[in-house]
Image (cartoon, rainbow, N blue to C red):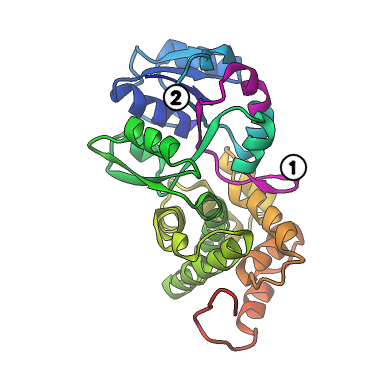
Amino acid sequence: MKISVIGCGGWGLAVSSLLEGNGHDVSVWCFLEEEYKLLSETRGNEKLLPGVHLNENIKFTMDMSCAEGCGIVVVAVPSFAVYSTALQLREHIEKDTVVVLLSKGFDKQNGYCLLADSLRKALGDKGRIVALTGPSHAEEVARKVPTAIVAASEDLSAAEMVQEAFVNGFFRVYTHSDVIGAELGGAMKNIMALAVGISDGAGYGDNTKAMLMTRGIAEMARFGVYLGGKNETFAGLSGIGDLIVTCTSNHSRNRRAGLMIGAGEKPEEAIKKVGAVVEGYFATEAIHHLAKDSGIDLPISEAMYKLLFEGADLNTVATSLFSRSSKPEFWQPGK
């Protein structure tokens, strides 16, 4: 199958390598000329994927017409660029083209909507959208480390088409119909990874880390159900699975930024040092705005907003979390 990958970050390159290895005709669209030249000349990006060589069959281009005639087009740009990129992509795809969303996060420009909604607004009646999400560090997928992920879409045949195109001996794909839950899990887990990084950087401990991860998934599920997702989705790969890998791995940009913030760095300085998009920072702002009139209890997300955007003191925020009124552990939707 002819497939184009729109975006040449680490995840876009890892997926390009996977798809080419599966026998597909793969082209990769680059936004910056310097990226295009680097990839064309060296067949890799040592900063993003150390030691990974991309097969000569993969074609690099700066012309988005590479998407024309493709059965699948993969969108692998940062969250803030999804809408603007999709506007350009629209003229190059057909109504039945399957558009795979790899990006995780929210679109501030369109009212902090989830990115599948942002894609739909930009593409209009073009494309059948599938969100591909779950615990999948690009560095490991590129090295063929066993990985499982979810293809979520209201269009089951589109999800199954993605499943068939991507699956192989080290990369397992499950289909799912809950796009909202799958996407929200992929976006909110970045907030929790930042929180865990801050906790570790401040020297709290394993008990605190376990608390933040466990109560974090409960928070994600509460808000996911409020938005229309399914509670059980957050017990799967796009929920707890993605949360675990992002909170515990040093591949995680969000965790690395959190470690520096917890050790005393200003958030802006830590994000700059990471040198790549720290999606949890932007997701924290989005959740704050989306949830402010919802009545949904999101204590960790709100604590993160105070730390990152209001300059609150870490110890004060931690104390306020533990000073909240006592309640049962388990929450039931609708109660």
Kind of residue indicated by mark 2: Asn
| Residue under label 1 | 110
Kind of residue indicated by mark 1: Asn
Q: Nearer the viewer, residue 253 or 90?
A: 90
Give the quadrant of the C terminus: bottom right
Q: Is residue 101 magenta?
A: yes
| Residue under label 2 | 45
Q: Which of label 2 and label 1 is nearer to you? A: 1
Q: Tell me where the magenta segment starts and ends, as one range.
A: 86-115
Residue positioned 68% across, 26% down in the render: 87
The mark that comes first in sequence, 2 or 1, is: 2
Residue 226 picture location, percent across and down: 62, 64
What element does badge 2 sit on?
loop
Q: What numbered label is drawn on residue 27?
A: none
Residue positioned 56% across, 42% down in the render: 274
Residue 69 picture location, percent across and down: 49, 14
Q: Is residue 148 magenta?
A: no
Marks 1 and 2: in contact by CB < 8 Å? no
Q: Residues within 10 Å of mark 1 (few under 14, many from 20)?
A: few
Say whether residue 238 is left or right of residue 88.
left
Residue 259 picture location, percent across and down: 53, 56
Compared to residue 285, the image places residue 326 above or below, namely: below
Residue 43 picture location, percent across and down: 40, 16
